[in-house]
Image (cartoon, coloured by chain):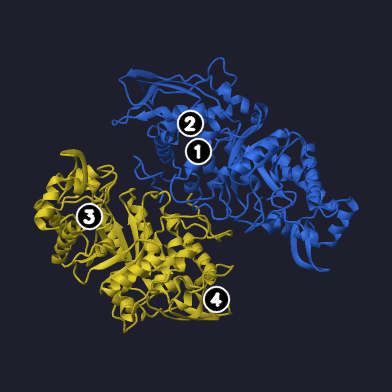
Chain colours: A yellow, B blue
Amino acid sequence: MFQTERRFLRLLFLLCILHYEAGQVFGVWPMPQQITQSTDRYLLSPQSFSFSYSKDSAAQSGCSVLDSAFKRYYSLIFPDAADGARLESFSQLVYQDKYNMYFVNKTEIQDFPRFEFRGLLLDTSRHYLPLNAILKTLDAMAYSKFNVFHWHIVDDPSFPYQSYSYPDLSSKGAFHPMTHIYTQSDVKRVISHARMRGIRVIPEFDTPGHTQSWGKGQPNLLTPCYKGDVPSGTFGPVNPILDSTYQFMSGLFKEMKSVFPDSYVHLGGDEVNFACWKSNPNVRAFMTKMGFGHDYTKLESYYIENIVNISSALNKTPIVWQDVFDYRERIPKDTVLEIWKGVPADYRTELAKITHAGYRVLLSAPWYINHISYGQDWRNSYTVQPQNFSGTDQQKALVIGGEVCMWGEYVDATNLHPRLWPRACAAAERLWSNEEMTSNVDQAFPRLEKFRCSLIRRGIQAEPLFVGYCKDEYRGV
Amino acid sequence: MFQTERRFLRLLFLLCILHYEAGQVFGVWPMPQQITQSTDRYLLSPQSFSFSYSKDSAAQSGCSVLDSAFKRYYSLIFPDAADGARLESFSQLVYQDKYNMYFVNKTEIQDFPRFEFRGLLLDTSRHYLPLNAILKTLDAMAYSKFNVFHWHIVDDPSFPYQSYSYPDLSSKGAFHPMTHIYTQSDVKRVISHARMRGIRVIPEFDTPGHTQSWGKGQPNLLTPCYKGDVPSGTFGPVNPILDSTYQFMSGLFKEMKSVFPDSYVHLGGDEVNFACWKSNPNVRAFMTKMGFGHDYTKLESYYIENIVNISSALNKTPIVWQDVFDYRERIPKDTVLEIWKGVPADYRTELAKITHAGYRVLLSAPWYINHISYGQDWRNSYTVQPQNFSGTDQQKALVIGGEVCMWGEYVDATNLHPRLWPRACAAAERLWSNEEMTSNVDQAFPRLEKFRCSLIRRGIQAEPLFVGYCKDEYRGV
């Protein structure tokens, strides 16, 4: 998927244009790698405008992704007239004068993404997000050139994924077995909507922690916690000592392979609380048998290695949270580590360590966008420098991108969109654009303000950056 | 208007009920002064249910506010079946079982508001709020028993109020002269929508500061600032030394009187920057002539006294920000001071001072709800104690209420509702309910969670308090 991005560049826009008087110069978000603008402008006629394929393009008519993108972007550009990534930049360059005539200024763009992996995480377990909220997020992601939807689909509070192999997982583990689930058809719709926008969908089935909701529909999966010599009635992480656990996980991941076509799968592996394992006499006996002593990180490693092997056998490339590296599991070299902890000093140290060990890495720590504060906190996201750590050029090349994470403790469909947009756009530009061309946050401000108004015009509930207005305000109240 | 609230209590709900098996016990937000609930429950039939007036009620059929409230609350209670403050409590007590039958538990309520003034401020100058966003806010205010809409309608950035006496104020001072204004018809609609929900509308025309947008449509109103001996081309606060200023203000307030029926008017008076006045030689000459020396607070006092007298002559009761008291203007004793500054120690001192001087007071300082932080910040709003300051009972009685303020620097229609709701409900309960019955924030939590789901069901985009779900999630995405 990443390779085709450059091919799109060669598309020819057959513009039916009239050379016209000089007009205003426009920005594009995220900033293209090279852009040369002129005040020469061309009048566009919605009646005769069309997109077409360049003769030397690898893609030709019949390419469903581009064919549908042409149609979609036509109505984004000319909303009055009717009902891909380069298309996005072009669409941002078209403007209307006060007589509602359409113009584009003479512009040359050379563009490609700085990082191949530009992700956004939604958490559908702490609150259920209706399908439309996810689809709309995908729309806005495409506008900002994000290309990975990291679907943190299940977690402790609820299990909304309706599995065909293990239907009890959602019928007992979702907030509601009918209204708060994602059916197979819903998942297909998300994947297809994303694919049409150049976005890959990577599901996360986080284990062995963050699995309380799994236990409701899958007996004997979670570790029974003990109080003294007797079970307390509560449960801890996935039980790593039973063969049945690995049989179940193997079955679930086989289903994942058939449902989610992407080559990556996110296995989680974060925040495992060892207290319950320590309380359980069978787990303690297993520790002794395996020679792990009292080091429960070894038990966690043992579990994760098994899960990684299951996913590798299915030809999936695993992504895991940084905890897995910190515990020194023996994991395949193609595993991607995702850094989520700490302040810049912490994540820079972690970037150096993980890349020194030869692993590819994703940065999320500075982009926990669920955290909010008063004022223009997008500025903090914008000034992140993902490759600013001690390391060789080879190490820096192992930073394949980053992710904006919208965890769901305080977020559902009521506030998702205004919290995401335009705040997430700051990371989108950091991940797409040349760092030197986008080093000045004050220069970015008016361009982002304008982009935010474009998002509003396209129906995205993007909140304001500061005092002011958009020509077309949000009316969906 | 406040008096009628107690009369509403005596309304008889002619419930066509069947005594039925015991059911669940429900909360009401804000907490009524007295509530006795039973597990006895009555089945309600949407087909035969009706509201009617008690024979000894002061209000009788033909009272437009109650007649329309009956109709409105009927569909809030029975949304499946078809298309007033006591009505609100009653509506929150009706619930459906799993067969969608409607029930109400046997309940006795005695209720009245703790404070007569329960306000919410919207700022329509820093961002323009479309009419629908205001009307929807009024709906949600009624659900929480707020009874004052403080319309901070104009300020520095824009002047959206379309005045019939001075049309240039909005045609030159609004963000856009046609799309970003409130016409006379819009204002009438807001006042009527509010009145039907027991909400008074108090406009604020803040002067002499916060008036940059006024200057565009009203030449010679603002003070020309000087750089040395020459005008710098910029303007400061309203010019307090010209007769024309007071003629204009008098004309504008006459119009206000005809447009806004409420007996209160908010005159502003906050944050006046003296630098421009000091720079202007004519202002300095006026200071000397009036014997004000170099004390520009005396000039501000002079201005405010004139404005207060203009509004008093129109039989309007003025509300002003605390700055006016701090500057020791000679203002009529019926003026209400609104406290907006500082941490609890500051506003408690101010409460003591202002009430000691015999003035009525409104508290806003702890309820600047535009300020956001990560997590459950409604808890801070909830634990405010408006009468907890050093003073006599007579002084405490001068605290007539408070206001939630939603300033518009970072807020427009895209994020207004989820920032307001349910966070503003915390102040609503503090202003309505008995303090002792609502002193425990943890006990309030599940009741507020339930109320938030009611708001969602009624179409208010109320954000979540924490992990969980509502039976009916927000679908307007």
Which amino acid is tagged 3?
Answer: Thr
> Is A158 placed left or right of A142 in the picture?
left
What residue would you read off at disc 2?
Answer: B438
What residue would you read off at disc 4?
Answer: A25
Which amino acid is tagged 1?
Answer: Tyr
Foreground: disc 4 or disc 3: 3
Q: Secondary structure at mark 1?
A: helix
Q: Pick the residue in front: A465 or A15.
A: A465
Give the letter of the chain under mark 4. Answer: A
Q: Callout 1: few (<14), some (14-19), or many (20+) C-alpha neighbours within 10 Å? A: many
**Above or below, A157 relative to A370:** above
In percent of width and height, residue B198 lies at: 58, 32
What residue would you read off at disc 3?
Answer: A207
Q: Are marks 4 and 2 on the same chain?
A: no
Q: Are marks 2 and 3 in contact (CB under 8 Å)?
A: no
Residue B347 numbered tag? none
Q: Are marks 1 and 2 in contact (CB under 8 Å)?
A: yes
Q: Are marks 4 and 1 in contact (CB under 8 Å)?
A: no
Label 1 and label 3: CA atoms lie apart by 38 Å
Q: Callout 2: few (<14), some (14-19), or many (20+) C-alpha neighbours within 10 Å? A: some
